Amino acid sequence: MRTAPLCRAWLAALTVLPLLAACGTGPNPVTNAVSGNEAPVAAAAAELVPVPLGVPDGMAAAPLDQPREALVPEGWTLSVFARVPNARLAVWTPDRNLLVSVPDDGRVLVLGPDGAQRTLLEGLTQPHGLAFSPDGSTLHVAESNRVVSYAYDAGAATDPRVVADDLPDANSPDLRGAYGHELKSVAAGPDGALYVSIGSTGNISVEDLTATPPRASILRIPPGGGPVEPFAVGVRNGTGLAVAPDGAVWTAVNGRDNVPYPYDQPYGDASGSSFGEVINQYVTAHPAEPLARLTAGRNLGWPYCNPDPDTQPGVQGSPQDLTDVPMVADAELNPGGRELDCATLPAMEQAFPAHSAPLGLAFTSGELPEPYAEGALAGVHGSWNADPPRAPEVSFFPYADGRMGAQQTLVGGFQDPSGARWGRPVAAVSGPDGAVYITDDDAGAVYRLAPPA
């Protein structure tokens, strides 16, 4: 286990962080010892009903070459808007077209109102995040190694200007090709500042904290460009990155895998302490994955602290509360809080169930009908290693007065009870026509979710 003091590591990377390393050596305390229910999945905002996926002629390639059914709010419909292999993040242009990033092809595509496609940008290095300046005149594209800003006008992106260069990716000499989360997201603040997600290189790669710039972080690019600076750290993989209508920066984070049991007590029917053991049932339900409001200097705790949503901490089958989720010390890297006192970190405002793998994050602001008019949309990719697998979905979180409400399922049905899937949403963005457009990199599609006419 690592014993180097955390304070020196993070203060070197970001001196404004309000954190103190704890000096205790004991494991996390025992709290309760009663049984509960299985960890919940997202709740529906309203009753969801099954509807057939509409597939236009010419778009029925696998896996949409057989009838598919989704769960949506009553009266809503879901149809295929376009087929885009490996479609990732999306953003609407000022002239009412949809941009979609395709990192595998190095392209950014334009989808017109009828779904017709053309290439806007090509020859890029894994373009992923897309964001427009508040006035719509500038398009920002996050490649794996840099952020480039383009003048945008009349459907054309011109005059590229690199605003952040030499960002870490698999080609960075010190990483030698080992980078598990090199795709980057970008969001634009109302003051013209940009925020860029820098994922961790691995599951618990502590060296990310002292890299320059720090990985597992959200960086800030000053308005007009300039040296990047850490804005928030301890963010394992904040692919979901968006600025709310009130200017607040939010991130949806993929948490660690194979988390060891962090309490000095038996888990389930074990006869002795289970502290430090990797237990499949515990791993399936832990840790929760944050949806957090970022402020300058905030630390989300990774890899030393994990969000624990159990209302009866350490108890197998405990009910979970995914609002204001407290942090617990990681048994592998931070036993007893000796690297970081997790109690000094603020709770996660909201969280997804473990292994949800939230990716795209975008806010709605009046484009959709109630109860979805004001809130956040998240593409939930679904787990790769939980048992049973966490199902993919499109989630909605109400947002009002700077507070994020609880997760609700807006679109489900991508996974059957056996765990087999026909789609995996990446991002969902509300369109100027009052519909939601959803990218799916697994099915190679963009869907249109339309409310009742």
Image: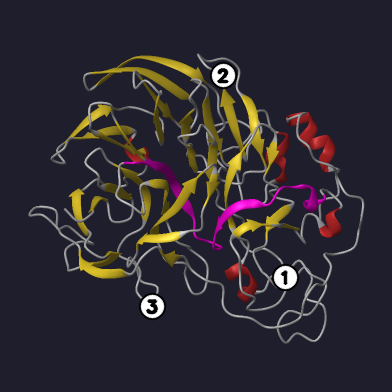
Mark 2 or mark 1: which comes first in sequence? Answer: 2
What amino acid is at disc 3? Ser
Q: Nearer the viewer, residue 375 or 401?
A: 401
Please tell me whether residue 422 is drawn above or below residue 324 in the rendered image.
Answer: below
Q: Is residue 442 at all visible to an observer of this figure?
A: yes
Give the quadrant of the N terminus. bottom right
Tell me the distance, in whole angstroms, between the alpha carbons under discs 1 and 3.
Answer: 29 Å
Tell me the distance, in whole angstroms, between the alpha carbons under discs 2 and 3.
Answer: 48 Å
Q: Nearer the viewer, residue 183 or 75?
A: 75
Q: What mark, if any, has residue 222 been given in the picture?
A: 2
Numbered circles on residues, count = 3
Q: On the picture, is 420 further left or further right than 252?
A: left
What amino acid is at disc 1? Pro
The segment highlighted magenta reads 341-366
Q: What mark, if any, has residue 418 been given in the picture?
A: 3
Mark 1 or mark 3: which comes first in sequence? Answer: 1
Q: What mark, if any, has residue 313 been given in the picture?
A: 1
